Every structure is written in structure tokens, then in C-alpha cells.
Image (tube, rainbow, N blue to C red):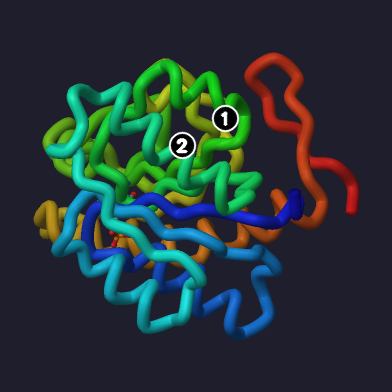
């Protein structure tokens, strides 16, 4: 298996997928993006992936499976068939079943729009704004069985401004995400890391 091969799972707008594709095209992110999976037929991410010429772009409908484990198994089979080393979640809005996480232990990466471990869950942006923090940001982390709880690979902070709405703060966080995600994927497939407990220790180039 190519150690730089990745599958992206996305449910929505796909702006993180788009910047990863741009970075691949520009030669600054040496990953081999083989497969994009979406659980939503209308996801813009599918259009972005097809337009960029990703070799395999699939919509897998949860409605066609008896339960979450069966749906996740179908996604996992597609990922294995495509020979992907890393699974990159980019706005993937479903919680992964324990069997999926165990099958790809240590190989699933997510980006969360807050500085973990604060503000886990579906509305990290709104929860940070409501709480009143003055700094928020984004976190790239490994996925384990705890929601938004895996070891942290990278973080970037942005200010929270007095006149921010949820949308304006999310926009600022996404600008940081669009730098951090391709850069972190590059680092994963070029230098690599080891784990010391929860700590991610980047290997020397
Ligand atoms: C991002 O803000 C990410 O942090 C969160 O979902 C959003 C996805 O945005 N997990 P996009 O679909 O990549 O534009």
C-alpha cells in the first residue's frame, strides 16, 4: 500500500477537500488521493472531486443499509479496495462506529473547528462563541472511539472578535483550516509521527 494514499470522507460543502486537491495539484501536498466518499448524494464535495479527476468518487447511501455498522462496513470495504492508508474526514457529519475506528486504528484523521479539548461536538464554532472565549481555532486530530477525543496532530488559533457572528467566526476558522489541513497531511506522509501516550511526536525530517 502506498503510504501516502488517502481516502476523503465528506458530507457537505467540501472546501477542505478543495484546498487539499489544490495543494496536490500545486505539488505542495504529496498525497495520493484515490477515493472520495460522501454519505449525501447532493454534497458539493462529490462535484469538486469529480471535477478534479479523483479516480474514484462514490455516494454511499446510509438508507441502503440496516444500521450504522453495516453502512460503515460498506465504506470501509471501498476504502480497502482502493488501497488507502489514511482516511481523512473533511466535514463528514456522521459518527463512525467502533468497528470502523478499530479497523483503521490510528489511520483516521479529522479536522474540528475549535481548539480541542474545548467545544467538542457538532457546533464547536457556536459553542465557543456563546461561551465567550477570545481565541478559538481548529484542530487536526486522530480519530479514536471518543468523540473529538483522539491525539492532537496540529492546531491553529484565530481571534474571536466582539462583532463576530457564528458565520463570521466560522469563516475565519475555515481560513485557518485551509492552511492547516494540507500542511498537516503533508507532514504525516513525509516526516511522520509517533505516539507517546496521547502526545504526537513528529519525527525529524
Ligand atoms: C469544517 O469547518 C470542519 O472543521 C468541520 O466541518 C467543516 C467542513 O467544511 N469538521 P467543508 O465541508 O470542508 O467546507
| Cα gap from disc 2 to disc 1, whole angstroms | 9 Å
Q: Is residue 139 visible?
A: no
Residue 59 appears anywhere in the view: yes
Label 1 neighbourhood size at 10 Å, few (<14), some (14-19), many (20+)?
A: some
| Circles 2 and 1 in contact, beta carbons < 8 Å | yes
63 displayed left or right of 111: left
Residue visible at 60% across and 75% down in the picture: 24
119 to the left or right of 144: left
Camera-side residue: 16 or 98?
98
* Residue 97, horizontal then vertical, whole percent: 35, 21
Give residue 51's position: percent from left, percent from top: 37, 83
Q: Relative to residue 53, is residue 204 depicted above or below?
A: above
Q: Position of residue 44 (x, y in %)?
A: 22, 69
Rendered residue at 46%/46% (across/down): 78
Q: What residue would you read off at disc 2?
A: 76
Please state which of residues 138 and 88 is positioned toward the viewer in this rendering.
88
Label 2 neighbour load within 10 Å: few <14, some 14-19, many 20+: some
Q: Which residue is mark 1?
A: 104
- The quarter of the picture where residue 168 lies is bottom left
Q: Residue at x 50, y 43 (%)?
A: 140
Amino acid at each position: 500500500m502506498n503510504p501516502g494514499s488517502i481516502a476523503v470522507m465528506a458530507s457537505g460543502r467540501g472546501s477542505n477537500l478543495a484546498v487539499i486537491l489544490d495543494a496536490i495539484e500545486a505539488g505542495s501536498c504529496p498525497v495520493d488521493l484515490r477515493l472520495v466518499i460522501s454519505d449525501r448524494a447532493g454534497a458539493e464535495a462529490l462535484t469538486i472531486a469529480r471535477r478534479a479527476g479523483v479516480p474514484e468518487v462514490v455516494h454511499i447511501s446510509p438508507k441502503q443499509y440496516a444500521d450504522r455498522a453495516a453502512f460503515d462496513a460498506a465504506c470501509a470495504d471501498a476504502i480497502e479496495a482502493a488501497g488507502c492508508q489514511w482516511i481523512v474526514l473533511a466535514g463528514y457529519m456522521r459518527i463512525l462506529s467502533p468497528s470502523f475506528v478499530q479497523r483503521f486504528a490510528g489511520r483516521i484523521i479529522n479536522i474540528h473547528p475549535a481548539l480541542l479539548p474545548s467545544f467538542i461536538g457538532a457546533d464547536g464554532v457556536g459553542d465557543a462563541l456563546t461561551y465567550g472565549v477570545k481565541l478559538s481555532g481548529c484542530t487536526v486530530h486522530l480519530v479514536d472511539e471518543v468523540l473529538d477525543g483522539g491525539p492532537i496532530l496540529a492546531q491553529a488559533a484565530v481571534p474571536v472578535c466582539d462583532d463576530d457572528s457564528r458565520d463570521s467566526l466560522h469563516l475565519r476558522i475555515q481560513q485557518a483550516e485551509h492552511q492547516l489541513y494540507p500542511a498537516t497531511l503533508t507532514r504525516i506522509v513525509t516526516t511522520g509521527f509517533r505516539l507517546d501516550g496521547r502526545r504526537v511526536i513528529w519525527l525529524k525530517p
